[in-house]
Image: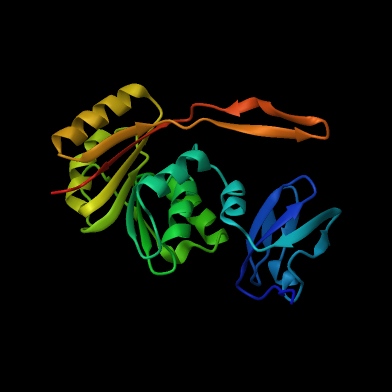
Amino acid sequence: MQKSVEENEAVVLIDEKGTRIPLIVKDKNLRIKRLGIYNPKELIGKKYYEKIEIGNRKFMIFIPSIFDKISAIERKAQIILPKDGLFIIYYCDIKSGDRIVEGGSGSGALTMLLAHFVKPKGRVISYEMRDDFAKVAQRNLENAGLNEYIGIKKGDITSKIDEKDVDAVVLDVPNPWDVVQNAYKALKLGGHLACYSPSMNQVEKTVKEMRMSSFFGIKTLETIQREMVVGEMGMRPSFESLGHTGYVTFGRKIK
């Protein structure tokens, strides 16, 4: 039976060009870029995967996937892309019920991915120093319907981490080496540290500090992504590849 949209649900509207608009279905007029004023309560009772018209544009109503949620976020800072974020999920063994500390909320893309995997019983505590980044991240998380699994904390993660016995610490900050000791103290035995860094010299400083702090199994990875173009007469690699974005360094606390 085809499900109907209900009040307070998270939905995403996708038009014929693939533009995604995430919404929480409640009685509130919203100003949506290139669409104008729209009240999501008009969606109540409509069927998912039904086509609708808003103004002169046609949309389909979807139950949002994590891909939809991240693709549609408002960007205030450069985001960690799924090709790197999913490696973090895999190598840090992030799962439902985990408690995760994140350093650097940015626009909230990685925060959103972490929350998707720790819900419904886990929680992400995200440290962010900049008010403008924190506000954008909070809006994105609310639009995605994930804010109940996340706490954005104003603070400098290089100074201290309040939480103890957490399952993982994930860092997207310019100076992760300054957080390594705090991360070690915050992690439970067997807990994971992941540090995302765009440049090699950041990695070298971070790895040096991780070795001094006795992290185990230290490893740095770079992922390259290339789409395949499939046509009627055959398949070829895309001429555009998603190359270097950053390096991710991992380690575990074992004593």
Residue 81 appears anywhere in the view: no
Residue 142 appears anywhere in the view: yes
Question: Does residue 92 lie above or below 198 as drawn?
Answer: below
Left/right of residue 29 with respect to residue 193 in the rendered view:
right
* Color encoding of the figure: rainbow
Question: Does residue 215 lie above or below 147 as drawn?
Answer: above
Residue at x 26%, y 31% (from the top left corner): 206
Residue at x 51%, y 30% (from the top left corner): 224
How many marks the image carries: the answer is 0
In percent of width and height, residue 135 lies at 47, 52
In percent of width and height, residue 215 lies at 19, 40
| Quadrant housing the N terminus | bottom right
Q: In which quarter of the view is residue 221 placed? A: top left
Observer-nearest residue: 104 or 116?
116
In percent of width and height, residue 140 lies at 53, 54
Question: Does residue 127 lie above or below 237 as drawn?
Answer: below
Residue at x 75%, y 70% (from the top left corner): 42
Observer-nearest residue: 46 or 207?
207
Question: Does residue 35 lie above or below 205 as drawn?
Answer: below
Q: In which quarter of the view is residue 37 placed? A: bottom right
Residue at x 45%, y 47% (from the top left corner): 110
Left/right of residue 54 with respect to residue 237 in the rendered view:
right
In the displayed orientation, state which residue is furthest to the front: 234
